[in-house]
Image (cartoon, rainbow, N blue to C red):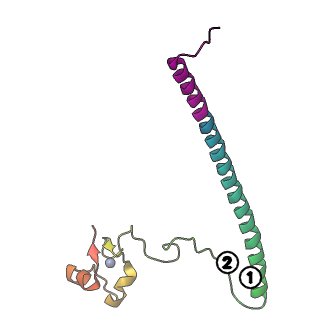
Amino acid sequence: MHLAYPSISSVIHNVELYDRKGSAMARSGQKALLERLRKLDQERDALAQQAKEQLIARANEVIKELNKLGFNYRLASSSRTREARGGISPNKPCQICKFRTDPPHDARRHKAQGRDKKPFTQAQLRDFGYTRLD
Ligand SMILES: [Zn+2]
């Protein structure tokens, strides 16, 4: 009886085929996992948004109650930029100096100059610890 052993090269070929199939399966499994994670992330965002809206509605109710009692409150998000809160924009030059400094400053820094406001001199900037940027 003749036993038909597979040749080495055909074994290697089969292993390679199996490997390729296996990694393709692993890849598609990974893709599905990532897809699920992405979906969960979206779901989480949607839920967080929903929860936020509900909490804001509740907070506004509470604030309304406070204001009815004569207090003056309002809801504010701290995610507003520093500039929106009346801070200094690091990208805008000072209205008086017409240049930017590091750290940034604005016209308010010139208050001490009284009515006749002038751009800061190099010496003054040095005293304040400011570096002229442009
Ligand atoms: Zn200035």
* Image spot of residue 34 (x, y percent): 62, 46
Image-quadrant location for residue 99: bottom left
- The residue closer to the viewer here, 59 or 66, is 59
Q: Main secondary structure of the magenta part?
A: helix
What is the number of the mark on residue 63?
Answer: 1
Quadrant containing ligand 1 reads bottom left
Q: Quadrant of the N terminus?
A: top right
Residue found at the far front of this picture: 1
Asked if 48 appears above or below 5 in the picture, the reply is below
Name the side, left or right, on which 132 lies relative to 19.
left
The part of the chain drawn in magenta is: 1-24
94 part of magenta stretch? no
How many numbered marks are there?
2
* Image spot of residue 126 (x, y percent): 23, 82
* Residue drawn at point x = 69 percent, y = 53 percent: 40
2 part of magenta stretch? yes
SS at badge 1: helix
